[in-house]
Amino acid sequence: MQFYKNLSSQEQKTVLFGGIALSLILFYFLFLEPLQAEKEQLSTIVQSQNISLQWMQQAVAEVKAQQAGGARGQQALKGSLSVVVDNSLRSSALAKKDKRIEPEGDKKVRVHFEQVGFTALMQWLVNIYSRYTIEVHSIVLEKNDQPDNVRARIVLVHF
């Protein structure tokens, strides 16, 4: 403080305004700029999530529309449920995907995909339901790093 008092009036004003300017600059770079960057990042995440939500809602609507179309064109199962599921997978867009099929009796089969396109998976599920009335008993989907890709564990049933 003694140093400041020893300065002339002009120098005191210069030091005072310089201190105020330095304080404002530090406030901006330490508080405001990081907050703005975080806001932009969260805004991008929210926008991405909204796009995913809209797409999923559209997929749900398509599945419900297919289910409402229901019994038209249904075929009887030719062979066991696991054979029909396997054959339908081989003739679909999922033919080359890494999958594991595990029969559980005559009426139930488990299908596991390590990485599969969500859209292609939903189209296949709609197809086997509309053609054979094979229903999804349970499904667990885990998002992968790539867009539209999931890890899927599905239990299918046929009554």
Image (tube, grey):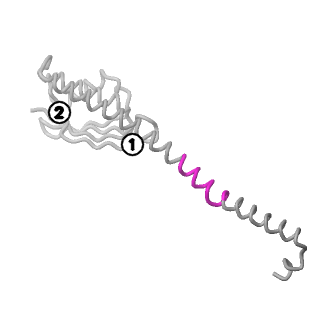
Q: Which contiguous range is marked in magenta?
A: 28-40
- Position of 48 compared to 91: left or right? right
SS majority, magenta: helix
The image shows residue 34 at horizontal and vertical percentages of 60, 55
Q: Nearer the viewer, residue 103 or 16?
A: 16
Residue at the location (20% across, 32% down)?
A: 82
Q: Which of the 4 image quarters holds residue 112? A: top left
Percent of width and height locating residue 16:
79, 68
Amino acid under disc 1: Lys
Quadrant where the image shows the C terminus: top left
Image quadrant holding the N terminus, namely bottom right
Quadrant for residue 32, please give it: bottom right
Upstream in sequence: badge 1 or badge 2: 2
Q: 118 or 77, which lies in front?
A: 118
Which residue position holds label 1? 143
In-front residue for pair 108/43: 43
* Percent of width and height locating residue 111: 26, 37
* Circle 2 residue: 135
Q: In the rendered view, tell whether residue 36 sits above or below residue 144.
A: below
